[in-house]
């Protein structure tokens, strides 16, 4: 066989492998969707302690030095004002609720506007919830944690986080309750719920913690910019229940354990008032 023919065959093989690998790639938000591949059972074979051993591409879950979540210990936080106010430019977008088996996700089909972090725009792709919270403040864990997952054009991630304690109902969750009930106990169920405006997610404070970490589910991708809002908002026990029933294992939780800080700097943005 001529060398040119051999080269052609190898080129075609490379193209086929590339296409297949991209077709099996993770979704645009970078997280693993298949709940069967991992769970939150602490001593289980597919639990958090073993995530890094389950797949070669998940090795950062076990070896990474910049993993999330972490404890936001106030005495180790640097108070700054140079980070600037979080710039939000969200817009209403067609959205789908999905029970992923390890959490409830609200996916914005065409993105839902963006935020700017250090001058870089990140598009809002999806939001999801963890119960109890993954991040802690001075060792205290909360009832619920919302993650707003944003992605830049070059595939970098920025996650905005809101923590909740038990109290008055959250109005944004109230607007989703009918949809949540329909997919709450149905594995891999999806429901289009029409146009959703993420501006209705209440932040309530200009103050926020900022640090560099990772996704909190496999593949635990690092260099994620985390913005954890300082104000703790409220949610009812029934609203937490609607989100928690999506966890289809015996852990009754979908919160990854706290990870080592490893000398990372954590900032608390506080506006400079005149």
Image: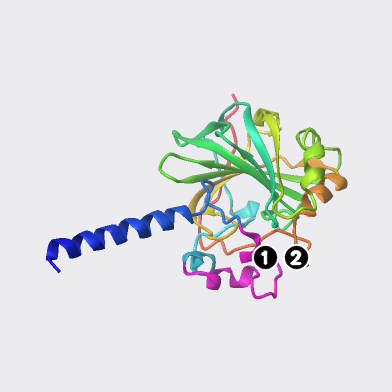
Q: Residue at x 80, y 44 (%)?
A: 182
Q: Residue at x 46, y 53 (%)?
A: 23
Q: How many marks?
A: 2
The span shown in magenta is 34-56
Q: In the rendered view, tell whether residue 28 sits above or below residue 178.
A: below
Q: Nearer the viewer, residue 73 or 1?
A: 1
In which quarter of the view is residue 273 placed? top right
Quarter of image, res 52 = bottom right
Give the structural element (helix, strand or loop) at label 2.
loop
Percent position (x, y) of residue 186? 77, 53
Q: Which residue sits furthest top?
A: 274
Can you identify the residue that label 1 sits on? Answer: 39
- With 99 as the anchor, is 88 left or right in this view? left
Where residue 208 is drawn, which disc sits there? none
Residue 5: name its quadrant: bottom left
Find disc 2 in the rendering and name its residue: 249
Quadrant where the N terminus is found in the figure: bottom left
> Is there a contact, CB below 8 Å, between mark 2 and mark 1?
yes
Question: In the depicted view, which residue is nearer to us: 45 or 260?
Answer: 45
Question: Magenta includes 42?
Answer: yes
- The mark nearer the N terminus, 2 or 1, is 1
Query: Which scheme is used to colour this image of the protein?
Result: rainbow
Answer whether residue 229 is magenta in the image: no
What percent of the width, then of the height, locates residue 258? 64, 62
- At label 2, counting other C-alpha atoms closer than 10 Å, the crowd grade (few under 14, some 14-19, many 20 or more) is some
- In the image, residue 115 lies at what x, y percent? 53, 33
Instruction: Report helix, strand or loop for mark 1.
Output: loop
Residue 72: horizontal and vertical position, in percent?
A: 64, 53
Residue at the (65%, 64%) spot, across then down? 36
Residue 271 visible in the shown view = yes
């Amino acid at each position: 066989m001529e060398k040119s023919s051999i080269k052609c065959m190898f080129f075609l093989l490379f193209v086929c492998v590339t296409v297949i690998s991209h077709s099996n790639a993770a979704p645009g938000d970078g997280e693993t969707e298949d709940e069967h591949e991992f769970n939150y059972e602490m001593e289980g074979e597919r639990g958090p302690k073993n995530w890094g051993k389950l797949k070669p591409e998940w090795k950062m879950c076990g070896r990474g030095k910049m993993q999330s979540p972490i404890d936001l210990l106030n005495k180790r936080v640097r108070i700054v004002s140079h980070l600037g106010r979080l710039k939000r430019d969200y817009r209403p977008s067609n959205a789908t609720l999905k029970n992923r088996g390890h959490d409830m996700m609200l996916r914005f089909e065409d993105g839902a506007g963006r935020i700017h972090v250090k001058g870089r725009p990140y598009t809002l792709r999806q939001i999801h919830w963890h119960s109890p919270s993954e991040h802690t403040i001075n060792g205290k864990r909360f009832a619920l944690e919302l993650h707003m997952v944003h992605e830049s054009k070059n595939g970098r991630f920025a996650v905005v986080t809101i923590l909740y304690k038990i109290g008055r109902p959250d109005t944004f969750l109230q607007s989703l309750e009918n949809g949540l009930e329909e997919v709450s106990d149905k594995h891999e169920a999806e429901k289009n719920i029409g146009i959703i405006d993420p501006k209705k997610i209440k932040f309530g404070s200009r103050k926020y913690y900022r640090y560099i970490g990772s996704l909190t589910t496999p593949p635990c991708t690092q260099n994620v910019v985390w913005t954890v809002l300082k104000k703790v908002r409220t949610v009812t026990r029934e609203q937490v229940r609607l989100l928690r029933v999506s966890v289809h294992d015996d852990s009754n939780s979908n919160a990854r354990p706290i990870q080592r800080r490893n000398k990372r700097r954590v900032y608390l943005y506080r506006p400079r008032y005149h």
